Image (cartoon, rainbow, N blue to C red):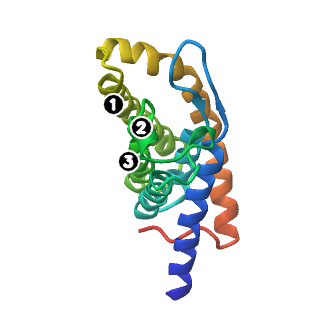
Amino acid sequence: MKNMKTKNLAATAIFAALTAVLAQLVIPLPFTPIPFSMGVFAVFLTGALLPMSNSIYALLVYILLGAVGLPVFGHFSGGIGVILGPTGGYILTYPIMAFLVALFIHLFHKRSVLSLAIGMLCAIAVCYLGGSLWYCVVARVTWAKSIALTVLPFVPFDLIKIVFCIPLSLALAKALQKARMLPANS
């Protein structure tokens, strides 16, 4: 029992760190204030590989580390100012996104292409909703303008992330289960 708690804690920390690493893979885009980021890919993996509660904890740890000033957000930035800035709404949805991916695995009683696809599509919809509404407030623009600037340019990229993340998640889950490194589902 103690060994399983240790594995869950370690996996949670590893996925918080993975998110911090992948969040640094950003490409500023000239037509939008929101950069292309691989942070969302890490969030998908977190939800796909960790149990629901651990997936939430991993992303909450990531956000808290960034909020206190550690440079875990894109461009090696950190601090509450990032959360209160244009990308803050997206970052704040990360725990919900990971939870949704893990929830669909739980609802389907297995990790499959279908459960991951539905979970990731629901997760990205929540990300778009939270991020675009937050951007409306921060930038003082209409929701339609926010959607045009902060959602529509990213839909093709995020669909590609999902297409690549699903088989990677399935392969990693199989390998981690074989090595008995995947945390127990909760």
The answer to whether the residue labelled 2 contacts the one labelled 1, judged by CB atoms less than 8 Å apart, is: yes
First-in-chain label (1 vs 3): 3
- Observer-nearest of 42 and 34: 34
Q: Relative to 64, is 186 above or below?
A: below
User: Which label is found at residue 134?
Assistant: 1
The answer to whether the residue labelled 3 contacts the one labelled 2, judged by CB atoms less than 8 Å apart, is: no
Q: Is residue 141 left or right of residue 150?
A: left
Q: Is residue 55 left or right of residue 49?
A: left
- Observer-nearest of 150 and 81: 81
Q: Relative to 7, is 118 above or below?
A: above
CA gap, disc 2 to disc 1? 7 Å
Residue 158, image x and y in percent?
55, 29
CA gap, disc 1 to disc 3? 15 Å
Residue located 66% across and 64% down the image: 176
Considering the numbered disc 1 on the image, is that residue within a helix, a strand or a loop?
helix
Considering the numbered disc 2 on the image, is that residue within a helix, a strand or a loop?
helix
Question: Looking at the picture, which amino acid does disc 3 mark?
Answer: Ile
Label 3 crowding class (10 Å Cα cut-off): few <14, some 14-19, many 20+? many
User: Which label is found at residue 88?
Assistant: 2
Question: Looking at the picture, which amino acid does disc 2 mark?
Answer: Gly
Reading the image, the residue beneath label 3 is 96
First-in-chain label (3 vs 2): 2
Q: Quadrant of residue 118?
A: top left
